[in-house]
Amino acid sequence: MARGWRAPWFLLLPAAFILVWHFAVEGRWVTEGLIPSPAQVLRSWHTWIFGTTKMTLSPYSGTWLDNVLYSSRRVLQGFGLAALVAIPLGLMIGWNRLVARVVDPTIQLLRPVPITAWLPFAIAVFGIYDASALFLIGLGAFYPIVVNTTHGVRDTNLLLLRAAGMMGAGPGTVLAKVVFPSALPAIFTGLRLGIGVAWTAVIVAEMIAVKSGLGYVLWDAYYVGRMDICVATMISVGLLGFVSDRLIVYASRLVLRWRTLEAVA
Amino acid sequence: MSARSGGAAQPTVELRGVWKEFVKGERRVEALQAIDLALAPKAFTALLGPSGCGKSTLLNMVAGFEAPTRGEVLAHGSPVTAPSPSRAVVFQEPALFPWYSVYDNVVFGPKTQGRPPAEYRPRAAQILEQVGLKGFAAHYPAELSGGMKQRVGIARVLVMEPEVLLMDEPFGSLDAQTRTLMQELLLAVWERHHQTVLFVTHDIEEALLLADSVCIMTARPGRIKKWIDVGLARPRTIEVTTSPVFNELKREVLALIREESVRADADRALA
């Protein structure tokens, strides 16, 4: 592992981007006041995170963590719910032809409906409450997880199924000890795609269907002309999405240790 | 008919008038025609034939992976309808579970069948030693060479103490040296356990070295062409392959196989 110092090449593009951004604003390449400079965003973000919540003129001061927690909790709940339904269902669709014939066409028909199109329906049914947001997040994350799980199950090596069969494994054992582990890499791919959709969905839902969280702040700040807060929110969501994706990758490395061995061999 | 049975005893496995057809889209492919075959208890039978002659299909039907189009596959007189630990299979590819360690792969069978750990644990350790995998129990398949993987494939069926061992070109994908080692290993293991073996191969030397009798198949559609009694003394070692008797047998089988290869080639030219 110790390969010595490696140039942090991944910082090159972000640094260049920030530089261009800085000079675009400071050099008045863009209309004045339309877009805040990186420094402005950083200052506002700092106040948003560390500012006092009492006796202040800024409505955003010190509310960052609360809103991050609101959004993260919704993502976690919606995503968890989606995984809880989508993984078993995907296993069944991939495993059982009858379940596939009954369930799969409906999923494939509903899947092209964007979650944004579900917004009015969600608000009508669940109201301007958390349930609306959870429904949208869960639905959005559900599709990639169920589709990838199904594919993972169907990709199970026939020889492994036969090997399990000749060693006396019944359908339950085959599903738990052969099909499921064999589908795990695909399931993790589904989870990674799913968490991405979940962050998209939470922002959309909070913009319209609930009155808290980063999505709500984003829309609210836009309305009152606080583009600095908008940009800080965008970066916050980006970072949270990145961190949650890394967590899933880390979990998959732990669970799929046999696979990293395979890559080395 | 070229059916055989080991004297008066009931054969362990029997195929009666078995035909197998595959339907590929519009085309029907005849894989096997009119197969009558019996495996005597504790006999080592090699199934030898040109590639594509349906010998693996035959083995798959004995295993219970595939059903015959016509005819019957019997184990102890009752029809084979599903795979069973009593008819264990060693595949051409090791087909190990990559997410399990060597040990967990080996005890998969007994564990799945609900045998007590006190029974299979010592046996698994003993068999791992017999196949030369002592000290590799905690390794994962990805960390093993091709030959070692195939040893695990053999160990995991031996640990189930199957009555019938079905081997589908198990050493086909190994290099020549490893293959010889594995053949010697199999001879030693078989001397100890004496299962009924059906060993599919297209390697004439391998068939003669290992088997009591060799069943030679025709090119597709596969039929049984001839049975050859090997009759070399046991226990055998690899040295037997250099003896005059062995070479005589080899010449005989080679002539029979060549006929089939020529015929298969002519069929292809006509088609």
Image: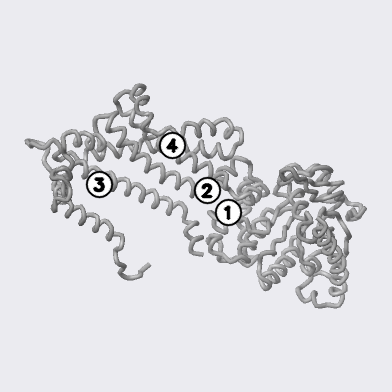
Residue at position x 66%, y 70% in the image: B175
Where A261 sits versus B250, above or below? above
Q: How far is the residue under mark 3 from the one under mark 4? A: 25 Å
Q: Between A226 and A6, which is closer to the camera in this rendering?
A: A226
Identify the subunit bearing mark 2. Answer: A
Q: Are marks 1 and 4 on the same chain?
A: no
Left or right of residue A44, residue A143 in this image: right
Q: Nearer the viewer, mark 2 or mark 4?
A: 4
- Which numbered tag is attached to residue A142? 4
Real-space Cα separation, disc 1 to disc 4, in angstroms: 29 Å
- Chain that bears disc 1: B
Q: Can I make out residue B30 in this image?
A: yes
Q: Are the two marked residues, 2 and 1, in contact with CB atoms closer than 8 angstroms?
A: yes
Disc ID at residue B97: 1
| Residue A191: x %, y % from top left | 42, 44
Mark 3 on the same chain as mark 4: yes
Residue type highlighted by circle 1: Phe
- Image position of A53 with respect to B110: above or below: above
Which of the marked residues, 3 or 4, is nearer the chain's N terminus?
4
**Numbered circle sitting on residue A235:** 3
Tell me the CA gap for discs 2 and 4: 20 Å
Residue B126 seen in the current view: no
Q: Which residue is painted at 21% across and 41% down in the image?
A: A230
- Disc 1 is placed on an element classified as loop
User: What coloring was used for the rendering?
Assistant: one colour
Lower position in the chain sequence, tag 2 or tag 4: 4
Crowding near the residue tagged with mark 1, few <14, some 14–19, many ≥20 C-alpha atoms within 10 Å: many
**Separation of disc 3 and disc 2 at Cα?**
36 Å
Residue ranking furthest to the top:
A124
Q: Quadrant of the N terminus of chain A?
A: bottom left
Tell me the element at label 3.
helix
Q: Give the letter of the chain under mark 4.
A: A
